[in-house]
Image (tube, rainbow, N blue to C red):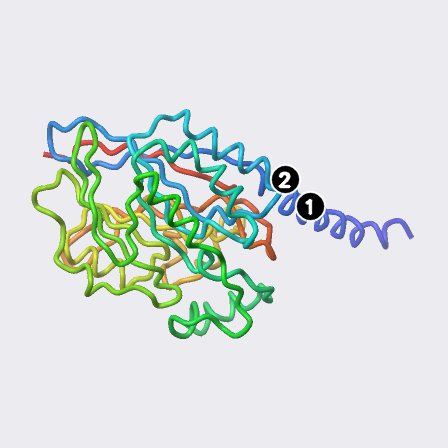
Amino acid sequence: MRARYGVPLGITAFGAACVGYATLVEPRSFRLRRVTVPVLPPGMKPLRALHVSDIHMVSGQTKKRRWLQSLAGLRPDFVVNTGDNLSDPHAVPELLDALEPLMEFPGTYVFGSNDYYGPRLRNPGRYLVEKASGRHGLNGNQPVVGAVHNPWEPMRDAFDAAGWVGLTNARGELKLEHGHLALTGLDDPHIKRDRYSEVAGGPDPDADLSLAVVHAPYLRVLDAFTAARYPLILAGHTHGGQLRIPYYGALVTNCDLDTARVSGLSDHRVGDRRSYLHVSAGCGANRYTPIRFACPPEATLLTLTERPR
């Protein structure tokens, strides 16, 4: 009798342990990744960029809030926020409290769909169906029926008041102590709000570095930025796959980017042109799927160094 039920009970216990870990432990195991990207002109002093994304703040997430506040101790040269800051329409004050120390530094931002619209309860299996069918995101730039309007305007106003540069289908610049950055950004391609024609024209030849920023790394956007010769593109959205199989990797990216580049630094190529692409796995999750497995929440400190001569 013991042998008969031992294996099923063992499998059940292991499954329950995995669910508990993915729900209660790993989503709170925040970490910092460090990446070096050789994109600066020869002779230029290195710059340090803190890339944060997909915070998905929910009221009461004290540990996440304190961890984000602690990142100011890194003293970055500038901050890049690639969107999906909210997962709770009541969490704007807590989000701004979390980011307040970082807003003391120069920064730039774009928004994602969850900044505009509150998340809805969905069957997680739909992500696998969408991957198989090639469909991702919403149909057009209007919310689906029943979507909740998130109060993104106070968040935008606070970022702007801090001097962060908004890149919602816009171009801008950051004049740092040791460099001049030209910035080009798009609204979220996941809900088809990107308007590349409004920012076309390529990198600024007078800047030390031209940086492209977008929330969701859809191929049409990456292709456009790479064809225009942007040396570095920063994005988020994917959550690093959120659930990864050890020794295999992510199953989905929630966009048309391949799973091999679901997070971290990689290349994107269009013909003979190449851009570096950095995709943040983010530090949060949709409030209705608050789980992560083999994909801990993160921020990244990018050290930008001289490109090869």
Residue at x 77%, y 48% (from the top left corner)? 10
The residue lying toward the viewer, choosing from 220 and 103, is 103
Which quadrant is home to the C terminus? top left
Q: Which residue corresponds to the image point at 54% horizontal and 44% vertical from the top-left?
A: 294
Query: Could you tell me residue 67's position as x and y percent?
Result: 51, 33
How packed is label 1: few (under 14 Cα within 10 Å), some, or many (20 or more)? few
* Amino acid on which the number 1 mark rests in the picture: Gly
Instruction: Name the quadrant containing residue 124.
Output: bottom right
Q: How many marks?
A: 2
Which amino acid does the dot numbered 2 rest on? Val
| Residue that label 1 marks | 20
The image position of residue 60, as x and y in percent, is 62, 42
- Extreme residue toward the right, this view: 1
Distance (Cα) linking label 2 and label 1 = 7 Å
SS of the residue at dot 2?
helix
- In this picture, residue 201 sits left or right of residue 263: left
Q: Do the residues bearing badges 2 and 1 touch, measured as CB atoms within 8 Å?
A: yes
**Residue 221 vertical placement versus 96 (above, below):** below
Q: Residues within 10 Å of mark 2 (few under 14, many from 20)?
A: some
Question: Along the horizontal axis of the image, is 293 left or right of 250?
Answer: right
- Tell me residue 48's x, y (percent): 29, 31
Which of disc 1 and disc 2 is earlier in sequence?
1
User: Residue 119: which disc?
Assistant: none
- Would residue 79 appear left or right of 116 to someone viewing this image? left
Residue closer to the observer: 115 or 189: 115
Tag 2 residue: 25
The image shows residue 188, relative to residue 264, as above or below, that is below
Counting from the top left corner in percent of width and height, residue 305 is at: 21, 31
